[in-house]
Image: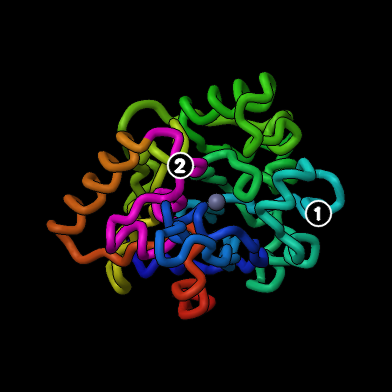
Amino acid sequence: MGSMDVHLLDRGSMSIDLNYPLEGAVTATESNPNPDAVRADGPVFNLVIEHPDATVLWDTGSHPEAGDGYWPAEIYDAFTHTDASEHDLPTALGERGFSLDDIDAVVQSHLHLDHAGGLRHFAGSEVPIYVHEQELKHAYFGATTGTDSAYILDDFHHDLNWEPLYGDGGYLFEGIDWLHLPGHTPGHTGLLVERNSAEDLLVVGDLAYSSVNYEHEHPMGRDLLHSRQDWWASLRRCKELEKRRALEVVYGHDPEQVAHFPPTF
Ligand SMILES: [Zn+2]
């Protein structure tokens, strides 16, 4: 496989309470009974992977009207994405020299509202949308029963060419494998991208919001873990892969990592 250039699409940034990405980050103690809450930045980004057989889009980010009532008010108050409209998908693609028509396949790590908000652009098209079977089922269940407010039905309830992924992992394109990495959500999926002339990538998505979750094995807060047990197992699986080969791990919303990534890597 050649260099398989990977481009970072800037989709803006959310402001969130640090206790979401880092369990117990701000905790009252006897000596400090009223610690100040901390808001942290969580960049939202997508990737375009230039595979010889297909231009692949990884995730589709937030809907541009997230702050205009498209996201439920209480969700937007907690996960505040003020610049979603200026970083909508067509704009972000254009900044890297792509248009929607260039995208041959979409891989959704999961269907949360900061990842699935651009799927509507592929409604009615033949572009395959790869997503884990368990994610698609859980998203519909969560959105239609109101039991999981991180899913918005209008993000994914379109005439889309779904290509469900079944099982633990498998082949997507030559040099690109997908991995079922549940924990954050039941059907959360990562990518392993093999590149000869550049470092291999392990895109873990929201298995790890930041390097702290991954490197220090610090869990995300309870609200961001559908299953803590699955999360640990997925983390172990990734670390086993890393023992066998050098991998650059790409996290879901790490401000330091995103700031240091070149636009194309
Ligand atoms: Zn996310």
* Above/below status of 104 relative to 123: below
Horizontal and vertical percent position of residue 206 = 46, 50
Q: In which quadrant is the N terminus drawn?
A: bottom left
Q: Which residue is mark 1?
A: 67
**Ligand 1 closer than 8 Å to label 2 CB:** no
Q: Nearer the viewer, residue 151 or 6?
A: 151
Q: Is residue 159 left or right of residue 263?
A: right
Left or right, 31 with reference to 120: left
Point out the stretch of residues depicted in magenta.
205-227
Say which amino acid is labelled 2.
Arg
Q: Residue at x 78, y 55 (%)?
A: 64
Residue depth check, mark 1 versus mark 2: number of the one nearer the observer: 2
* Amino acid at pointer 1: Gly
Observer able to see residue 211:
yes
Q: State yes or no: discs 1 and 2 in contact (Cβ < 8 Å).
A: no
Residue displayed at 70% across by 35% down: 152
Q: Earlier in the sequence, mark 1 or mark 2?
A: 1
Q: Which residue is mark 2?
A: 222
Q: Quadrant of the C terminus?
A: bottom left
